[in-house]
Image (cartoon, rainbow, N blue to C red):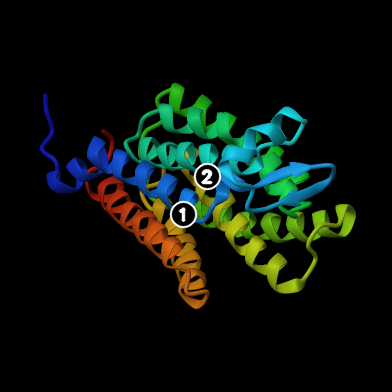
């Protein structure tokens, strides 16, 4: 028996392959515009703005293509988000595979706490894949939901500041606070995803509002466009999970 959806148009947007392609192209174009592809890590230092014609000669000499791997990771991270919204196990699987790449890149860009935070993220994605493979059903928020969000923030702040203290990297307070907020929100959201809470995407809405606000303050038009897309995706996915339920 087919159950009628309360808002079928929202489900259509969430499942749209055209929005997948739009998002992937948008993220790739923004990365290319910001010259991410010209960033390499060589002899313990990051070099920006390496011309394309000179890029592969650096790689042949042993440079790590930090920018290229970051671009690939960004595109697949977007696809992981979209497929997770579709309630497809493919989403968490892609997220699991991109975690190692993202962790290495984040660490090289100065986030020393990545040594701790990304292994934890890897474990959480493994947990999501396991629960979704077992056929977890959508559930309404309860005491556990709020506990997950609270502990996510506590663990997020603890790991980021502990990582900065133990391993160095960037340790300016504003950087660590913003990093703690975004990491804490993502922790809570990912664990809530494993339990498939209807309100899971509320955390991603808050996360994207913070990132959008930061991009506006920096007058970074490219990132403004990217986080408008992410915010739109989080809003429609929240509506689909809350009002249309399981796929």
Where's the C terminus, which quadrant? top left
Nearest the eye: 12 or 39? 39
| Residue 245 point in image, percent of width and height | 26, 41
Q: Is residue 237 left or right of residue 219?
A: left
Nearest the eye: 61 or 140? 61
The furthest residue to the right = 166
Among the two numbered marks 1 and 2 on one chain, the one whose residue lies closer to the N terminus: 1
Say if 56 sits above or below 43 in the image: above
Residue occupied by mark 2: 190
Q: Is residue 91 left or right of residue 184?
A: left
- Residue visible at 60% across and 46% down? 51
The furthest residue to the bottom = 217
- Residue visible at 36% across and 33% down? 137
Nearest the eye: 43 or 17? 43
Where's the N terminus, which quadrant? top left
- Mark 1 and mark 2: span between their CA atoms? 30 Å
Say if 65 sits above or below 241 in the image: above
- Residue visible at 78% across and 52% down? 112
Secondary structure at numbered mark 1: helix
Residue 195 seen in render: no
* Residue 5 found in image quarter: top left
- Residue visible at 44% across and 37% down? 80
Secondary structure at numbered mark 2: helix
| Residue 232 point in image, percent of width and height | 31, 57
Mark 2: few, some, or many residues within 10 Å (few <14, many ≥20)? many
Depth-wise, is mark 1 or mark 2 nearer the camera?
1
Residue occupied by mark 1: 33
């Amino acid at each position: 028996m087919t159950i009628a959806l309360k808002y079928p148009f929202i489900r259509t947007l969430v499942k749209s392959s055209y929005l997948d392609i739009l998002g992937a192209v948008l993220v790739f174009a923004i990365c290319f515009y910001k010259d991410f592809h010209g960033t390499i890590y060589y002899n313990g230092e990051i070099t920006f703005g390496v011309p394309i014609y000179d890029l592969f000669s650096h790689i042949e000499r042993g440079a790590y293509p930090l920018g290229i791997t970051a671009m690939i990771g960004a595109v697949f991270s977007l696809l992981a988000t979209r497929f997770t919204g579709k309630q497809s196990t493919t989403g968490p699987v892609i997220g699991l595979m991109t975690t190692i790449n993202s962790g290495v890149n984040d660490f090289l860009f100065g986030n020393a706490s990545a040594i701790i935070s990304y292994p934890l993220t890897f474990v959480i994605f493994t947990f999501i894949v396991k629960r979704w493979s077992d056929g977890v059903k959508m559930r309404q928020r309860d005491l556990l939901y709020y506990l997950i969000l609270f502990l996510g923030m506590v663990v997020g702040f603890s790991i980021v500041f502990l990582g900065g203290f133990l391993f160095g990297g960037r340790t300016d307070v504003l950087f660590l606070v913003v990093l703690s907020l975004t990491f804490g929100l993502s922790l809570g959201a990912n664990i809530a995803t494993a339990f498939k809470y209807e309100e899971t995407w509320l955390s991603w809405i808050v996360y994207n509002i913070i990132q959008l606000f930061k991009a506006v303050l920096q007058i970074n038009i490219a990132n403004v466009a990217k986080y408008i897309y992410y915010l739109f995706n989080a809003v429609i996915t929240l509506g689909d999970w809350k009002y249309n339920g399981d796929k």
